[in-house]
Image (spheres, grey):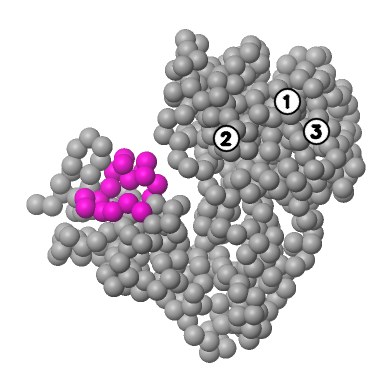
Amino acid sequence: MKIEQLYTGCLAQGAYYIESEGEAAIIDPLRETEPYVEMAKDRKAKIKYIFETHFHADFVSGHLDLAKKTGAQIVYGPGAATEYEKYEAKDGEEFKLGKVTIRVLHTPGHTPESSTYLLLDEDGKEHAIFTGDTLFIGDVGRPDLAQKATGLTQEDLAGWLFDSLRDKIMTLPDDVIVYPAHGAGSACGKSMSKETWSTLGEQKRTNYALRADMTREEFIKEVTEGLLPPPEYFAKNAALNKQGYQSIDQVMKRGAVALTPEEFELVANAEGALLLDVRSKEEFVKGYIPNSIFIGLDGSFAPWVGALIPDLQQPILLITPEGSETEAVKRLARVGYDNSIGYLEGGFAAWKTAGKEVDSIATIGVGDLEKAYSANPSIPIIDVRKPSEFDSEHIDGAQNLALDYINKNMALIKPDEEYYLHCRSGYRSTIAASILQARGFDKLINVHGTLDEIVSSQIPTTDAVCTKSKVN
């Protein structure tokens, strides 16, 4: 028996490859099919099943393309209605894979169709559970994502989740390995661990949601507290996973069109395309194509694209580091942005060489921010981190406008005033600055530097407990 976790840090997502006696199963595959097809080919195995734990909201699954390429059967748990052919398993139904068995445990709560897959080894012993978004390491799936689609309340779904955990999962042996669909950084939970697997016994000891003395009412209260609105693309991705989508091969072919600077400019104007610059933040602020938006591949690229670009069908032209063109198109497709229509051949350097217009963003370090603050403590500072981060600690007098909602909160910023933008590292503030500057806000000063540098500087910060004045 072989189990391999294929973890993708950009999405904080875990897919799984299980194999026994030349038969393989994939659980919760990403959009691109090559890793799974090649893994099976290298091991001379045939992919027999594709198991989906639920309708994913934070990425487009690769189940349809993978099934077409391998002949594998798509399996969902009870209640999963789709517009394509699949097998809807019954609670407790078992599937043979070589000498091992995979048993379906219907565990509704995160969504109504959510199911956990229990792997029984060659001797019939419970070996591992693939929990999807039902149980994470240190957390459980948020129960509010399926409300609109079901007419249920988050309290209804939280109650189902309580029952699922107590009746189906916590009854299993403590040495069973827990393999979730996500880790820290995913918006599908509140406080997931950075660890990507654990044992059930360890989770019973450390996961707040699995406390033995926890009442149903306490559970519902705790799992529904502090939930931020889900990213807008979540519902759209869930719909694609239910209804189907175009082949990833077509998407990749359409996006892999190299354009000269002249062609790039013509296509941008003719198609009303969004110019998406995926270079590093350091490269972007020094010079970029006017009106382009920065979301760097070296950060949480796909989730930020999903949060900030409202239309999945938006035509997108890419400015990438040379050699990263295909990677950018693939990462866009992972979250349903299938309308990449080309990239700038030669990258930004080719644009400059062609004598085209360029723009830049005024960017300083923490030391310069400290000097500006010392000279004038009332300078307007915008902190674009999440509200929970801001509430934990922030610069005295700073205004919190979370990047997630910047498109909705733009009216709170005055175009004719100067603002200093910062986050935890400069990645999010650069995204925010690029969006605002494209909308005519041209008096922005972007701050690159870590939050630790800000806290250790002479800039006063406030946390939930006290004010720490560091100015003599």
- Sequence-earlier tag: 1 or 3: 3
Residue 398 part of the magenta segment: yes
**Res 383 → quadrant:** bottom left
Q: Nearer the viewer, residue 121 or 422?
A: 422
Q: Secondary structure at mark 2?
A: helix
**Res 421 → quadrant:** bottom left
**Residue 195 picture location, percent across and down:** 54, 33
| Residue at the image point whose x is 19% and y is 38% from the top | 466
- Sequence-earlier tag: 2 or 3: 3
Q: Nearer the viewer, residue 162 or 24?
A: 162
Task: Tell me which segment is drawn in magenta.
Answer: 385-401
In the image, is residue 377 above or below residue 103? below
| Residue at the image point whose x is 51% and y is 72% from the top | 292
Q: Are marks 1 and 2 in contact (CB under 8 Å)?
A: no
| Residue at the image point whose x is 60% and y is 74% from the top | 272
Say left or right for 272 vs 380: right
Q: Secondary structure at mark 1?
A: strand
Foreground mark, 1 or 3, reads: 3
Q: Are marks 1 and 3 in contact (CB under 8 Å)?
A: no
- Sequence-earlier tag: 1 or 2: 1
Residue receiving disc 2: 147
**Residue 130 picture location, percent across and down:** 68, 28
Residue receiving disc 3: 75
**Residue 119 picture location, percent across and down:** 75, 23
In the image, what residue type sits under mark 1? Tyr
In the image, is residue 172 above or below residue 37? above
In the image, what residue type sits under mark 3? Val
Measured Cα–Cα span from mark 1 to mark 3: 11 Å
